[in-house]
Image (tube, grey):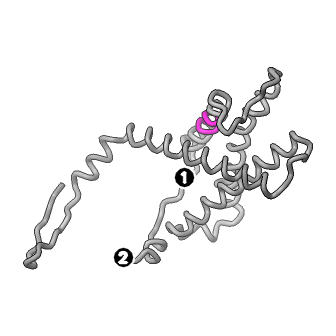
Amino acid sequence: MKFVDFLYTPFPRPEKNRKNLALLILVGLAASLFILIYNPFNIRTDTGQWYLDLVIFGLGLLFILSVLFMEWLIPALFPKPFKSWTFGKALIWYALVIVFIAAANFMYKSLWSNFNEFSWSDFLLVLGRTMVISFTVCFFVLGIWQYLNRNKISSLLANETYTVETLNGKSVALRL
């Protein structure tokens, strides 16, 4: 299968349900706590003023609102592009979601700095930070999901059959 053909394969869209909403809220709050505890990219407050911690915590809340906007509101307003969802569309869409979250974070940061740091280089810096945090959180969430669903995954993999062709042209079926 060519890579281009792979882009047109069907890909599942996330369901709009309470469980996914709760997971989104959990991930957003976890991201806020992660930023407050570990201070990635030197995102911290040295003044000791408590409300600045709330401003930093607001980044997670902004993440929740941004994802709700992109994943729930946009598909409801424009359903046609989301009907036949493919892997290629998902790659483009989730790249746009990350850029939207970065733009929202950039505007939030700029608002709190009275737009003193409002430039393309600052936007690219925020975009890079958002991408690194997004990928870190994604791998963390996927790792937890894989751990919690390890029995289901192993039972799916146990039913797979692979056909291997030997050098002399004979086919051998492997059931793993």
- Residue stretch in magenta: 26-31
> What is the three-letter code of the residue carrying label 2?
Met
Of residues 160 and 116, the one nearer the viewer is 116
Q: Residue tagged by mark 1?
A: 15
Q: Looking at the image, is 79 positioned above or below residue 18? A: below
Instruction: Categorize mark 2 by other alpha carbons within 10 Å: few (<14), some (14-19), many (20+).
Output: few
Of residues 159 and 45, the one nearer the viewer is 45
Q: Looking at the image, is 23 positioned above or below residue 99? A: above
Q: Give the Cα separation between the discs numbered 1 and 2.
A: 29 Å
- Determine the residue positioned at 61% across, 44% down: 133
Residue 74 inside the magenta-drawn segment: no
Q: Which quarter of the figure has residue 14?
A: bottom right
Element marked by disc 2: loop
The image quadrant where one finds the C terminus is bottom left
- Determine the residue positioned at 88% across, 41% down: 113
Q: Left or right: 172 with respect to 88?
A: left
> What is the three-letter code of the residue carrying label 1?
Glu
Can you tell which mark lies on residue 1? 2
**Coordinates of residue 12 in the picture (x, y in percent):** 48, 60
Instruction: Categorize mark 1 by other alpha carbons within 10 Å: few (<14), some (14-19), many (20+).
Output: few
